[in-house]
Image: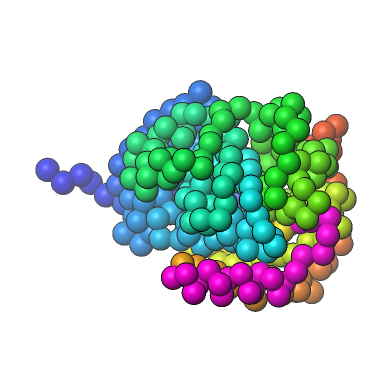
Amino acid sequence: MRRRIQIKMEWVNDDFGHCYLGRRQHQGKSKFQRMEIFHNRTFGTLLFLDGKIQIAQKDENRYHQYLVAAPLLAHHRPRSVCILGGGDCFALEEAVKHSTLPRILMLEIDQGVVDFCTQHYPEIRKVRQDRRVEIIFADARQWLETHAERFDVVVVDLTEPHGPSKMLYTREFYGLCRTRLKAEGILSIHTDNHFLFPDSFATIYKTLRSVFPHLLTARVDMPSFGMGWTYRMASRRALNYDRLVKNTRRLARRNLVLDQFTPTTYLLEPTPEEAVILKRRGRISTDRRPFDKFENMNKKVTR
């Protein structure tokens, strides 16, 4: 007997949302969050955590190529990467493509979501067999505070600043990340949509700039999110765009083509509208006064 078509609704804010038609394939609940894999004809499988879309089969490579591959290609010789969060493990899948990277560490507080995705995504089972990969199930901030290891690249692959995760978007946290980066290290993070979430967009930017003097920004479409999305690389030293181009071409010569990535995206200048938002909206998020993206929204947005 065929299962009936279901409707999956995700509220983006109080009066705008997305509707996906398809069928729920798997669901579960960990100590920290509800998990669901939903199949949709347009996007393939979609992963939702607490009702918020995280990745989709058809465009997760775009998301992770900008978040993970970009900083690895922008670095002159990366030997280590630390992924903060990343429970779906697709950031790991992107990292293991780089054969010259011997140290791949992921710090994820929720073993339940990692086990859930390992069970239901065959590609993740393969990734976890890579001997370079180490997953530590711990609070990322606490681990960084108590371990002095330094990395070439730190990837912040967290849920949006809301609830407990908002403490991993503060000036103090970015300062901690800076101490765990080597001299030429790069931090990579997703930084929201300026039109729908101007305060979140501007706050993340201003907080990063309060710690890192050099930023590069990419703006790309994320079809499964139904909106554009931004990514930023941050460093103590000026980021070398020519190196990013050169290393991307070198990767292609090894028949490893990043099919949804182009370095020219990092030549982005803010539009006049974005410039006004960055000037007038947002603030520096601190441990004492952390920013919460959904604090003033209806509960339906985060249920």
Q: Which residues are magenta?
A: 234-255
Q: Is residue 17 visible?
A: no
Q: Position of residue 270 (x, y in %)?
A: 76, 71
Q: Quadrant of residue 127?
A: top left
Image coordinates of residue 88 in percent, x first then y, are 48, 42
At x 20%, y 44%, the residue is 3
Task: Tell me the quarter of the picture where residue 28 sits.
Answer: top left
**Colour treatment of the image:** rainbow
Residue at screen point 73% across, 54% down = 186
Q: Position of residue 99 (x, y in %)?
A: 51, 56
Q: Identify the residue at horizontal 68%, vertical 42% (top origin).
A: 161
Question: Is residue 254 within the magenta segment?
Answer: yes
In the figure, 275 relative to 50: above or below?
below
Residue 122 vertical position relative to residue 19 in the rendered view, above or below: above
How many marks on residues?
Answer: 0
Where is residue 293 drawn, in percent x and y? 69, 44
Foreground: 265 or 250?
Answer: 250
**Residue ID at (49%, 51%):** 96
Q: Is residue 230 above or below residue 157?
A: below
Res. 288 in view: yes
Kindly indicate the quadrant of the structure image that contains residue 296. top right
- Would you say 276 lies left or right of 74 here? right
In the picture as drawn, the residue positioned furthest to the left comes out as 1
Quadrant of the image containing the N terminus: top left
